[in-house]
Amino acid sequence: MAALDRTDLLVIRWAQGEDGPAVALLDQTQLPHVEQELHCTEVSVLVEAIRVLRVRGAPVLGIAGAYGVALAAARGADVEGAASQLAAARPTAVNLASGVTRVLSVCRRIRAAGGGPEEVAQGALAEARELHREDAEASEAMAAHGCALLRELVPGRAMRILTHCNTGRLVSGGRGTALAVVGAVHRAGRLHMLWVDETRPLLQGARLTTYEAAREGMPYTLLADNAAGSLFAAGEVDAVLVGADRIAADGAVANKVGTYPLAVLARHHGVPFVVVAPRTTVDPATRVGADIVVEQRDGAEVTGEGSGTSTAPQGTRVHNPAFDVTPPGLVTAIVTEAGAVSPVTAPDLAELCSIPLERTSRSGNGMMNS
Ligand SMILES: CSC[C@H]1O[C@H](OP(=O)(O)O)[C@H](O)[C@@H]1O
């Protein structure tokens, strides 16, 4: 694997190639051993890329959804239909639907004002680019707020931080969410060890967080998910940092499956459990955690069925939720670009995110009314 310059990880970008406009993605299913860019010249290709996690992680899904609507507009395709397909590609990460809705609203507004296809395409791309830029900015702010909070929560010494799944540059327009905080702690000389959960079944930790930690020069150690408990028991964890895919109005956090058990372990062992996410991941239209739709994925991701190396008998029934939901009472703090809220309460979260508690309801296709 060629060592890459830090600034050179282009996770997602708008491309104008010989075959016209495209959404270019670093294919995360090929990492860490192959760095390959996928050019999506059709929305259907981008939808499939989202479904199979060639591009993944809540904030970057919002960026991908936004560029996807701009791609439909640029190619003179049915923008409304494209928006519905994109928003439905994965149900849990709220950023996807909100990124799609944001650019679709711009298309509708330009059209209603009498703009033609060219104006709609230009407006859509400009809005998608603005969302991309905002996410990069949010990432820098989260890193600063999160690092300051950790220095309060773990005073005086270099920290041993455990993380789950992948929350770095690969999920963001910038440095990421939780891993952006770890990077800031590392650059401040305060990171003793980053414990990396492999994160079964798709191994985002083993494949992607290790890849990013290595690029950043962080001290890191990979572990099987079920080894985390013994680390807590040995007093080897000073803080847990994770991302989020959707945060309900009451502060309940949907994140990669395996997050909830870490929150329970952290509470039992008196270890801070910190969630890092941009305000775009807080969804006031989802009142409580029980209302979060948790994506159920194909059992073959667990058994390997069909890949030639199946681990279980043919036809084994599999429970494979992509996420779980952690109640706010187990969350020490939620860090966003606007700052940190701790303890996590609905009014404080709403204030932090400058979101009025009463918000428009969802339309049937999972997209927010603009
Ligand atoms: C902060 S976004 C990263 C977030 O997304 C991951 O899910 P997936 O890999 O299925 O897209 C996981 O929940 C991470 O915490």
Image (cartoon, helix red, strand yellow):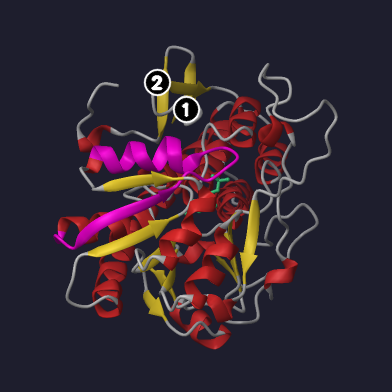
Left or right, 308 with reference to 329: right
| Image mark for residue 261 | none
| Residue 155 x/y as whole percent | 22, 78
Q: Quadrant of residue 352?
A: bottom left
Left or right, 127 with reference to 87: left
| Residue corresponding to mark 2 | 34
SS type, badge 1: loop
SS type, badge 2: loop
Residue 219 magenta-drawn? no
Left or right, 146 with reference to 124: left
| Residue 328 x/y as whole percent | 57, 78
| Image mark for residue 27 | 1
Structural crowding at the residue carrying mark 2, measured as other residues with C-alpha within 10 Å and reported as few (<14), some (14–19) or many (≥20): few
State which region is magenta: 188-215
Quarter of the picture containing the C terminus is: bottom right
Structural crowding at the residue carrying mark 1, measured as other residues with C-alpha within 10 Å and reported as few (<14), some (14–19) or many (≥20): many
The structure residue drawn at horizontal position 47% and vertical position 78%, both measured from the top left corner, is: 354
